[in-house]
Amino acid sequence: MAEKTIQTHDAYSADLFKDAEKNPENLVVVKNLKKYFPIKSSFFKLTVGNVKAVDGVSFVIKKGTTMGLVGESGCGKSTIGRTILRLIDKTEGEVFFNGKDVFKLSKRELRHARPDIQIIFQDPYSSLSPRIPVGEIIGEAVREHNIVPKEEYDDYITRVMEACGLAEYHKDRYPHEFSGGQRQRICIARALALNPDFILCDEPVSALDVSIQAQIINLLRDLQKQFGLTYLFISHDLSVVEHISDTVGVMYLGNLVEYAETDKLFSKPLHPYTKALFSAIPVPDPDYKMNRIILEGSIPSPANPPSGCKFHTRCRECMEVCKYCAPDFIEVEPEHYCACHLYDSPERQAELGKVMEEQKRAEQAAEAGQK
């Protein structure tokens, strides 16, 4: 009798949200998404390696909800967002928007879908053209995609601006005449003007003062209620994400290590990395003693990540299996997903034990051959 084939880490990720795109409640479905950037040699321009910016990520965003995506700088958050919007090509995996595979759309179909998927960039200073007045910045794409008839164009732009806290007389002004918070309102108005279903917010408040951050966050929430918008909110500020998000995904070095509803994640984090992140959140109480979890060592390079679990080099709860086998992204509790060997089933532990022993023998044979 043939021995049962051991299911790989990628196969677990691919099966996690099987047929999720067929559920009409799900607006965005991401399955085992990968994006690698090639490393070229300096002289012959040959590919000598890859930067694994996104390395097998899966999640679902339901209509009318906000998913927060958090993690350290360089973990791949913005790359995920740009890949979902097809601003950059994927290496592997699937992205579904309204049940359609984004990467299988023709140029014509993609052009028709563009108004439905918009982005708010991180920097409100460099994302606006300094040579175009604000009214034209907001209305340029509206005219291009024929969102409203010509005779209604001016009134429509005015309504959009007023919904975002801008006045009609701002139309003829240029971006340099506005503050950072007002510029971000212009960016929000530009995205909202196309009447989208989904907006990617790529750290939209990180460049703003704290008081202005609150105004922009409240504006985004009000617009979501008013227009039924769906957000992917990328940030490294956990307090902001907790305030605005319905679900939260935690990223580390190109992988999603935990994904759950906001209340579940903040009340009961499962992954050691998530626990370390939450222990760093400041508490406004001078008498409260923080139980900080200090992560030792530096972040590994995404061009040469550690074998097995990428977090094992900095993890306090590291086990032997973590050094050899990548953990599966599994549903530990209902609607609470985590990628950590602490939550492997006994059957999976036995399977991975075999894999680990095989890899150890292969390493020993390689070392003996070198000697």
Image (spheres, rainbow, N blue to C red):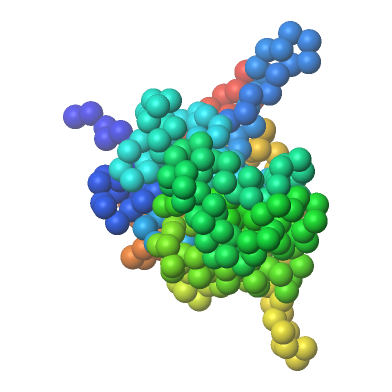
Numbered-mark total: 0
Image quadrant of residue 106? top left
Image quadrant of residue 238? bottom right
Front position in the image: 308 or 218: 218
User: Which residue is at 38% across, 30% downward?
Assistant: 109
Image quadrant of residue 219? bottom right
Tell me, yes or no, if residue 37 can be seen here: yes
Where is 18 relative to 94, above or below?
below
Where is 282 relative to 13, above or below?
below
Expressed as whole percent of the image width and height from the top left, the position of residue 233 reads 55, 57
Front position in the image: 368 or 162: 162
Where is 328 relative to 214, above or below?
above
User: Which residue is at 47% across, 61% downward?
Assistant: 66
Front position in the image: 121 or 175: 175
Q: In the picture provided, is 307 more to the left or to the right than 25?
A: right
Q: In the picture provided, is 106 more to the left or to the right than 71?
A: left
Q: In the picture provided, is 21 more to the left or to the right than 49?
A: left
Position of the C terminus by quadrant: top right
Expressed as whole percent of the image width and height from the top left, the position of residue 267 reads 50, 76
**What is the residue that sits farthest to the left in this orientation?**
1
**What is the residue that sits farthest to the top in this orientation?**
44
Tell me, yes or no, if residue 251 can be seen here: no
**What is the residue that sits farthest to the front in this orientation?**
151
Position of the N terminus by quadrant: top left
Expressed as whole percent of the image width and height from the top left, the position of residue 163 reads 54, 65
User: Which residue is at 65% across, 72% downward?
Assistant: 214
Expressed as whole percent of the image width and height from the top left, the position of residue 36 reads 58, 30
Front position in the image: 153 or 24: 153
User: Which residue is at 59% across, 56% downward?
Assistant: 188
**What is the residue that sits farthest to the bottom in this orientation?**
287
Where is 125 relative to 356, above or below?
below
